[in-house]
Image: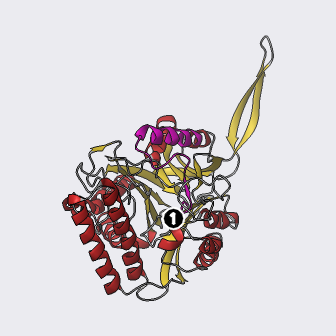
Amino acid sequence: MLKAGAGRTDITPPVGIAHAGWGAATHQRAEGVDMPFYATALYVTDGDLELAIVDLDIGILTNEDDAAIRAEVEAVAGIKPENLRLSATHTHSGPVNRGSWLDEGMEMVGPYWDSLPSRVAEALNTARWAAKPAHVGIGRGTSSININRRPALPDGTLFTGRNWDGFVDREVGIVAINDTIGSPIATLLNYACHPTILGPANRLLSPDYPGTARRVVEQHVGGLCLFLQGAAGNCGPTHGFIGEVEVAKWLGTRLGLEAARIRLEIDPVPRKERLVEVVPSGADLGMYEDDPDGEPDDTLRVVNTTVKLPVGNFPSIEEAQAGFDRVVETLNATRKTGSEAEIKEAVKNAKRSSFVLGNAKRTADGPISMRIQAMRIGPAALVAIPVEAFSEIGVAVKDSSPARQTLFSGYTNGSLGYMPVADAYEEGGYEVTTTPMAAGAAEETITACSDAVQALWR
């Protein structure tokens, strides 16, 4: 029988930290906190294999910070690095990463990221010590809070907004983990939607809609909820890029209520109805019991593999760094004397220059080696990759899976940028101009992910 436990630590950034990374933002520091940020951990073992999943309220987990967390978790909690999954919710209302064009609030950024390994290890230790015999169930539903975010102007120019006719994955995937008397230990909630309800005008630290969705599930179900971001590379919220936190709470509540509804209907133990007796009354009353009918699926497995991906053409690291430095120097001068419009233009240029620099570093050694991690927890398959994958990728992997339920996630185990599907390269747009990958990367990834899932069932 499996044993499972859940734990959580607070990872709320300090007020005043360099905030968000919007090219259209004019502020630099966070001015308050909307909701707490958490590291929420799930620990599962069959007595031999130990697996751990951590949901982090952060935007992007760099490869360097990913490695630091793994080292600390192995040292403190004893979880092997290859058996640990680190998933970012991808909120755009958190602190920036270590390398940024911002200058105010950056003194808090390094210490904040340096503090995460110990906090994640604490959450996992809590989960490990709380582990008890458990069963796993699955369910799925739908939510309409997301939309394809690649519309076009009349001249064909793509922008980031609402494309009501575009491809979108609205599945709400749920994995339920209960103890043997049926009490909830944890809920895994998988959904594909950029947490960009709160945009450039927002000056508060916020987990965006995932924070509210988790809270709603926990209020109605019990246990802890982990939000696992899906293939959201080309999906955003129906209401986005605004400053009103109440809108994020509204959409998060809608998603959370659907997830709670699904979760409350799940019983991980197969059951068969049995008529116990008929009691005479004004009407004869049937008394029933639901008896166990077979054993729950308690299989636990993990597969780690890699795939080589083609890359685009980028300048050398030295050239890209020099260009970035020039743009940041211009930005700093503009902040002192420029108008709001001039500052926004300078910030936009710095943001775009940072993409070029990041891609130059990622592709310096040629094709990218990308890690794929697939876990089997009972009847569920969990597939994770470190990119902002288009929704078509996630749906293709789920459709090819032999599992009764497959949760597909990007934003996990580091970060390698956007992964558009092949057709998008002809259309262009933000995701295509910022990806380090060449056309064909998505299709190779689908094959590799599908193979990894198949291996879990062999």
Q: In the displayed structure, would residue 353 be above or below residue 189?
A: below
Q: Is residue 127 rendered magenta in the image? A: no
16 to the left or right of 74: left
Between residue 14 and residue 55, name the one nearer to us.
14
Q: Position of residue 436 (x, y in %)?
A: 48, 77
Say what secondary structure mark 1 lies in: loop
340 to the left or right of 92: left
* Quarter containing the N terminus: bottom right
Magenta residues, start to end:
232-258
Q: Residues within 10 Å of mark 1 (few under 14, many from 20)?
A: many
Q: Is residue 183 visible?
A: no
Type of colouring: secondary structure
Which residue in the rendered view is the most extreme toward the top? 282
Q: Position of residue 369 (x, y in %)?
A: 48, 82
Q: Position of residue 4 (x, y in %)?
A: 47, 53
The residue positioned 60% from the left and 62% from the top of the image is 391
* Quarter containing the C terminus: bottom right
Q: Is residue 97 visible?
A: yes
The residue positioned 32% from the left and 60% from the top of the image is 342
Which residue in the rendered view is the most extreme toward the right? 283
Q: In the displayed structure, would residue 299 be above or below residue 216?
A: below
329 to the left or right of 271: left
Q: Position of residue 52 (x, y in %)?
A: 44, 61
* Residue type, mark 1 in image: Gly
Q: Is residue 253 rendered magenta in the image? A: yes
Q: Identify residue for label 1.
A: 410
Between residue 288 and residue 301, name the one nearer to us.
301
